[in-house]
Amino acid sequence: MLKIIVNTFFIRILNAFFALFVVILNSKIIGSEGLGTVSLIILAVSVFILMTGFVSGALIYFVPRENTFKLAFISYSWSAFISSVFYVFLIFVPLVPKEFINDVIILAFLQSAYNINEKILAGKERIKTANYILLLKVTVLPASLLFFYFILKIQSVESYVYSLYLSYLTGVSLSFLKISGYLKNPEFNNLINIFVKTVKLSGYNTIGAVLQKLNFRLGYYFIEYFWGINVLGIFSAGVQISESVLIISRSIAFVQYSKISNLSDKIQAANITIMLFKFVISVSAAAMLLLSLIPSSFFSFLLGKDFSVIKPVIYYFSPGIIFASGSLILIHFFSGTGNQKINMYSSFAAFTITVFAGYFFIKNTGITGASLTLSLSFFVLLIFELFFFKKQTNKKISDFLIRKKDIISGIIMLKEYLNK
């Protein structure tokens, strides 16, 4: 398991590096206004993915338990249906500029297809395969963006959209090729029963995920409304830089989810979760401390003079990133053990904080208030999850405290891995 975690971690680190490179490149070429438009496009795609999650949200959990072809057929069909619904939604609700609506629909469907394929691979515990496909997918984005910006001289938001097409198509094509072996001998019987089961479990999972996404991104709309798209571009850059630290917990949680979904021993799953929780909290706290120490002049040099005020976002969002890192581990424990309903309850509590605190903080203090709102929201999320974890597993809160033996065990495991 450690080997897979390390493999996943390094692949996701590269993913974060490319994402950061794209943010820097976009800030230099299309500026804060263009970056604000890009953030709205990505946010719209994310909203679509959350809607498709009402069927595919718990796919990793179901893959070891149901026929893979049936799960893929149901998930793809649902994504196609949501595409038409979301198109109508975007016409009446202007989440993105009208000229990008068609692009958002196509990109969203491609990303949804890739997510379905990736979850099937994870459910089969083919994590390394999924990781290498992700690496190729994310490599295409900055490479094609450089081509459009500097070879074809198309320095606009459209170039970013074209690059997303190439990146998403790469991911969908390669991942579908790898899952095709699991789709042989198609069966169409009992589809309705499987659909109902996936919707029931995935529904809780997706509602929780929607609320989590709103916790992260509702501030975007508040900032655009009260402060304008230029300030949104600055805030989104700060959030993306801070979120790069979450690559640690996301990479570990991805492996954890795959492992726990294939376990029948809940005690073992709980022990694995506590161990991983301690690790991600420690590493994430250290990473955010280092990130907070970087001077503002560096970000101004890196991103441009418009982004000289980005430091408060990182500083005030630091506690939120640490809370969110631990939260991700607990979320994937509940998902892997079929308790998605708990994730929904916890996310709702955090979302309530985001709505009320966010409106007043952002209206009065801008990006500083938005960052504080995120930290407060994720603190509430973590507290609720710890409460439910304790109730489900009979573990003590003190079990989550990092002790001397945990540090020694971690060092020994790292040495053993490095020796191998």
Image (tube, rainbow, N blue to C red):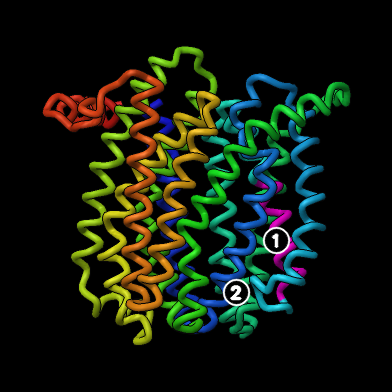
- Predominant SS of the magenta segment: helix
Which residue is painted at 80% across and 65% down in the image? 88
Position above or below: 65 against 305 = above
Please state if 148 lies on the left or on the right of 322 as rendered.
Answer: right
Which residue is painted at 64% across and 52% down in the image? 49
Contact between marks 2 and 1 (CB within 8 A): the answer is no
Which residue is painted at 50% across and 17% down in the image? 263
Mark 2 surroundings: few (<14), some (14-19) or many (≥20) residues within 10 A: some
- Image spot of residue 105 (x, y percent): 74, 62
Residue 107's mark?
A: 1
Q: Which residue is mark 2?
A: 147
Residue lying farthest left?
404
Quadrant location of residue 164? Answer: bottom right
**Residue span colored magenta:** 100-114
- Image spot of residue 232 (x, y percent): 46, 77
Does the magenta segment cover residue 41?
A: no
Q: Amino acid at mark 2?
A: Phe
